[in-house]
Image (cartoon, helix red, strand yellow):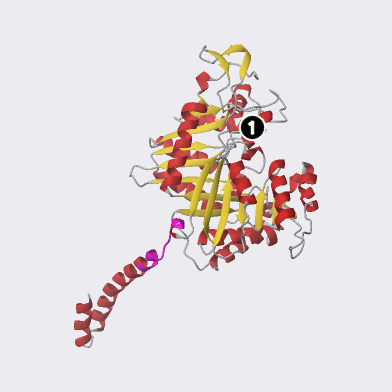
Amino acid sequence: MKMAYHNLKANKLKSTKKFHKISALLFLPLCLISLISTSAHAKKLSDYTPYNYDVLFTNPDCKEHTYKDPINSVKGKLIYNKPKNAYCKPEENKKVEEQKHTPFYRIKEWIRDPETKEIFMAYLSFSKKAIRDELCTAIKERGLKLTLIVDKNNKKRGMESLLDLKSCPAFRIGQDGISIPEVLTRGGEGRGKNKIGFAHNKLILINPHQKGKVKLAFSSGNMSNGTTTHHENWHFITTNSESYFFQSHLCLKKGLLDHASSIDVFTIFIKECRATIEAPEETDIKAFFVPAEGKEAMEALKSEMGHASEIRMATHRFSSKEIIASMEEALERGAHIQFVFDDDLYWTSKLKRGMGRNLYREAVHVDNLIQKGLKVKYIETFADSVFGARKVQLQHNKFLIFTGPMHDSYSVFTGAGNLTGAAFQKNFENFYLIKDPAVYFMFRLQYYKFWNDMGTAAEDMPERLVLP
C-alpha cells in the first residue's frame, strides 16, 4: 500500500477521480490500524499490580435438622430431615461466625488490617453486630474513618444500633484527632418516574482515596446474616487505584453521597464522571451502576443469554419481563437452562399465596417457564413459622453463569440486584459482567454443589410444609 501511495505521489495525482479512489482505499487500512491501536491499550483488571480476586460463597456448615416424624415426598418417599447445610437455624450463626475461609471472616480481616485507614460501605441493611463491633474497635484503636450508607427503611428497623457507631470514637495519644463515623440513608429520593427505589447496593471500598493498593468487595448479600447463613456470593478484589474498575467505583461513591436526589441527577453524574476516567475500561470485568446504567446492564445480560448454549441461574426474587422473554427465546432455540430458587417460591406456587419473601406472580412466571423446558431445584431454607415468618434464612444469590458453544465463550453476571424490573430501572444497584476463567470456574463448582448436594427437585420436595 505504501508503494502504491508513493507511485501516485510521483505522478502528482493528475487525476482527481483517481485520487479519491486511492484515498478511499487508504482510509480502510488506516481505520484498521486505529482499531488495532485502540485494542492494544485495552487492559484486563488482572494486568494491574497488585491484583487478587477471591470469590467466597457463604456455604454455612450447619447440623442436620430432623423432622419430629418422617413425612412423604411428592413421589412418596419418606423424608427424615432437611438437606444438610441448606437449612440453618439462627442459633447456628455463632458457629458459622467462627468458621474461617468465609465472607464473614474475610470482612473482619479487612477491617482489622492495620493498613486499613478508611472504609466506605453501602448496603440495603446492616444488622450484623459482630461486624459493627469490629468497626467500632478499629475506630477507637486506629482512628478508622468510616462512611456507611444504608437504605432509609433502616430508620424503622435497627437504625439505633448503627448510630451507636458514633459513640465509638475515643481520642488516644498519638492520634491527630477524633474520627467520627458518618451513617447516612439513601433511597426514595425524587418524584414520579424520577423517584429512586431502594438503596440496594452491596459494596465495600477500602482506602478509597489512597494511591496504589486498594481493595473492593461486592456481593449478593447484605451486612447481616448474608455474611453467614444466607446462601450468598461475595467478591473480594485487591487492585490498583489507577484501574478503570476502581475509578468507576469512586464515581459510584460520590454519586451516592452527593448526587442521589433523583434518577436523572444520579444518571447525569455517573455518565459525566465515567467520561473523565483516563484508564481504559477492563475487558475481564465490567460494572453497571443502576439506575444510571440499568439499560446497559440488561442489554449485556440479554446479549450473553442470546448466544449461550447453557445457562445456570440462581436468584431470590424473579419478575423481570425482559429476562423472562429472553429465557423463553433461549429455551425455544434449545438452550439448556437450570435455575436454583429458595423453597419459598415452591411453596408460593403450591399454596397459591406469597410465602417468605416471594410473591405469587413470581411463582407463576417460573411455572410457565418449567412448562417450556426450564429445569428447577429448590434450596430448603429455615423459617420460624409456616405463615408470617419473622426470622428467615434465604437462598439469596443473584447470578447467571453463561456457557457458549466455543471453549472460550463463558461469563458470569452477578451483583447486588435481583432479577426484577426495579433492580434494573429504579434501585441503587451495582451489577457486574465477569469474563475471568477463574471466577467462572468457581461459580461452576458452586452451582454443582447447589444442584447435586443441596438442591431439591420438585418431585423430592415434602408433600406438605412442615418445619423440623
Q: Write down the region rendered in magenta.
A: 37-46
Q: Which of these two is toward me, 325 or 435?
A: 435
Residue 368: image location, x then y, percent: 51, 30
Tell me what residue is drawn at x 71 percent, y 28 percent. 389
Q: Residue furthest front?
A: 173
**Vertical placement of 48 versus 203: above or below?**
below
Q: Which of these two is toward me, 95 or 73?
A: 95
Residue 290: image location, x then y, percent: 60, 53
Q: Which of these two is toward me, 6 or 114?
A: 114
**Vertical placement of 71 versus 276: above or below?**
above
**Vertical placement of 319 versus 241: above or below?**
above
Residue density around tag 1, few if under 14, some if 14–19, many if 20 or more, within 10 Å: few
Residue type at mark 1?
A: Lys
The C terminus - image quarter: top right
Circle 1 residue: 95
Residue 1: image location, x then y, percent: 22, 74
